[in-house]
């Protein structure tokens, strides 16, 4: 007799950037191999909506694809994941703090996203993922154009999630695709460009994310 998965029959929406949308670091994007594609098999969701967009930031930007811009499309869900921040870091966008309502900061933007999603999905469980480390545009540990490190963005995301008592999966600490490990890099490895997972990397990431989601 098969065991019922924790989220059997529920609806999931995954709001994020290219690492939710399924960009493979080799000029190909497919939601078919993205990590959300595994959430029915691993968690039991009956419906999974991938709301990822390549190059999306958390904070409001002039390109119209930020999480702030797109969070309004998500309604009547049982579970929502919020995953972004690496593009804010790469573009040197402001971090802000818990006191700000400035949507052009990571803190203000994320506060807005969470509050909007709560209004639109009052019964949903929401969780937040930190960005993973990168070794491409602005390698982790290198100051960006604003003089900030990626850990500053991670800290801001964690602070906002803590403010709203939302669970956080720290993929900065445990992304596990090996952006600084040469043997794991390449078309047949877990990342081809030291930032985005390959299809193989997305499978590994999906197992980690599913294990986290299935706690709730």
Image (tube, rainbow, N blue to C red):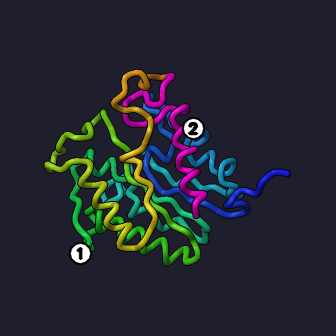
**Residue 7 percent location from the top left of the image:** 67, 61
Q: Where the C terminus falls, by quadrant? A: bottom right
Residue depicted at 48% across the width and 71% down the height: 117
Classify mark 1: helix, strand or loop. Answer: loop
- For residue 34, above or below residue 3: above
Q: Which mark is residue 196?
A: none
Classify mark 2: helix, strand or loop. Answer: helix
Tell me which corner region of the image, top left, top right, bottom left or bottom right, holds residue 182. top left
> Is 104 part of what is drawn in magenta?
no
Mark 1–mark 2 distance (CA, rounded to whole Å): 38 Å
**Residue 137 percent location from the top left of the image:** 27, 36
Label 1 neighbour load within 10 Å: few <14, some 14-19, many 20+: few
Q: Which is more toward the observer, 124 or 60? A: 124
Q: Where is mark 2, residue-wise?
A: 203
First in residue order: circle 1 vs circle 2: 1
- C-beta proximity under 8 Å, tags 1 and 2: no
Label 2 neighbour load within 10 Å: few <14, some 14-19, many 20+: some
**Residue 40 percent location from the top left of the image:** 68, 51
Q: Where is mark 1, residue-wise?
A: 99
**Residue 214 percent location from the top left of the image:** 60, 57
- For residue 197, above or below residue 57: above
Residue depicted at 54% across the width and 66% down the height: 74
> Is 205 part of what is drawn in magenta?
yes
Whether residue 92 sits left or right of residue 79 in the image: it is left
Tell me which corner region of the image, top left, top right, bottom left or bottom right, holds residue 122. bottom right
Q: Which is more toward the observer, 85 or 65? A: 85
Q: How many marks?
A: 2
Magenta segment range? 188-216
- For residue 69, above or below residue 142: below
């Amino acid at each position: 007799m098969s065991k019922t998965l924790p989220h059997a029959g529920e609806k999931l929406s995954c709001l994020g950037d290219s690492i939710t949308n399924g960009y493979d670091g080799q000029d190909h994007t497919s939601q078919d191999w993205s990590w959300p594609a595994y959430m029915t098999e691993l968690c039991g969701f009956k419906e999974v909506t991938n709301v990822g967009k390549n190059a999306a930031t958390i904070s409001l930007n002039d390109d119209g694809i930020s999480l702030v811009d797109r969070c309004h499309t998500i309604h009547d869900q049982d579970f929502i994941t919020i995953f972004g921040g690496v593009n804010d870091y790469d573009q040197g966008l402001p971090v802000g703090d818990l006191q700000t309502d400035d949507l052009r900061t990571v803190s203000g933007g994320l506060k807005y996203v969470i509050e909007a999603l709560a209004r639109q999905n009052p019964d949903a469980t929401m969780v937040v993922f930190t960005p993973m480390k990168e070794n491409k545009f602005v390698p982790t540990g290198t100051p960006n154009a604003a003089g900030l490190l990626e850990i500053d963005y991670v800290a801001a995301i964690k602070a906002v999630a803590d403010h709203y008592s939302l669970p956080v999966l720290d993929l900065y600490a445990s992304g596990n695709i090996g952006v600084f490990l040469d043997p794991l890099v390449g078309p047949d490895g877990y990342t081809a460009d030291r930032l985005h997972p390959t299809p193989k990397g997305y499978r590994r990431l999906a197992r980690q994310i599913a294990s986290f989601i299935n706690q709730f």
